[in-house]
Image: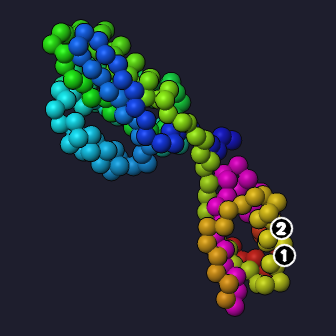
Amino acid sequence: MIDTFLTIKEPSEGEYKEKGSKFIAFAFQVKTEEEVKERLEEIRKKYYDARHHCYAYQLGQDGELWRANDDGEPNHSAGTPILNQIKSFNVTDTLVIVIRYFGGTKLGVSGLINAYKTSTWEALENAEIEEKIITETVSFSFEYLGMNDVMKLIKDYDLEIAEQEFTNTCQIKLSVRLKVLEEVEAKLRDIKEVKMN
């Protein structure tokens, strides 16, 4: 079972120049379409004088949500090459916006494809790519008698405690890596003081 995915850690940039035209690519980590809109708005405001603001993004652990936009460039000459680079770097939750300052000479469709592809490649090549682990939240309560068993399980699986509350009974929310989820849940059920929520 694959329970990790790759994304970029910090925003990064790339640039490509041809025949006076300048292409600047900006790569961002995004988690939602709302974030995509915000980033686009920022770039459009900051570089309002650019002729085009083309972009593509891929969201979700398997990159199941994606979109490519040519922003007035000929069909599939901008958004698609950007998206193909995102796919070839095998990253998701990633948005790349490429702005173009027109230099007066037309590049033709193949020239545009090359320019958008190369500037995107530069931005992603300059990015630090990180591996994210897919986790699920497991909540349960237990009597104090079960504390040692629960803490040993957390230590053995190197689990992250998302929330905990100790009153008459103990409540814990764990962040559990997907590939050990069933194992961890089974071991928790084996501890007689534990009640799964």
Choose top left, top right, bottom left or bottom right for residue 165: bottom right
Q: Secondary structure at mark 1?
A: helix
Q: Residue at x 36, y 34 (%)?
A: 26
Q: Report whether residue 194 is seen.
A: yes
Choose top left, top right, bottom left or bottom right for residue 153: bottom right
Does 166 sit above or below residue 173?
below
Q: Report whether residue 76 is seen.
A: no
Which portion, as a residue range, is magenta?
Answer: 168-187
Q: Quadrant of the C terminus?
A: bottom right
Mark 1–mark 2 CB contact (< 8 Å): yes
Choose top left, top right, bottom left or bottom right for residue 152: bottom right
* Label 1, residues with CA under 10 Å away: few <14, some 14-19, many ≥20: few
For this view, does 78 lie left or right of residue 191?
left
**Residue 148: image tag:** 1
Q: Secondary structure at mark 2?
A: helix
Does 151 sit above or below residue 41?
below
Q: Residue at x 43, y 40 (%)?
A: 11
| Location of residue 189 in the rendering, given as x and y in whole percent from the top left corner | 78, 69
Q: Is residue 89 magenta?
A: no
| Location of residue 116 in the rendering, given as x and y in whole percent from the top left corner | 34, 20
Does 17 sit above or below residue 25?
above
- Residue type marked 2: Lys
Count of labels in the image = 2
Q: Which coloring applies here?
A: rainbow
Q: Residue at x 17, y 36 (%)?
A: 48
Pick the residue in front: 170 or 28.
28
Residue ID for mark 2:
152
The residue most toward the bottom is 168
| Location of residue 122 in the rendering, given as x and y in whole percent from the top left corner | 44, 24
C-alpha separation, residue under disc 1 versus residue under disc 2: 6 Å
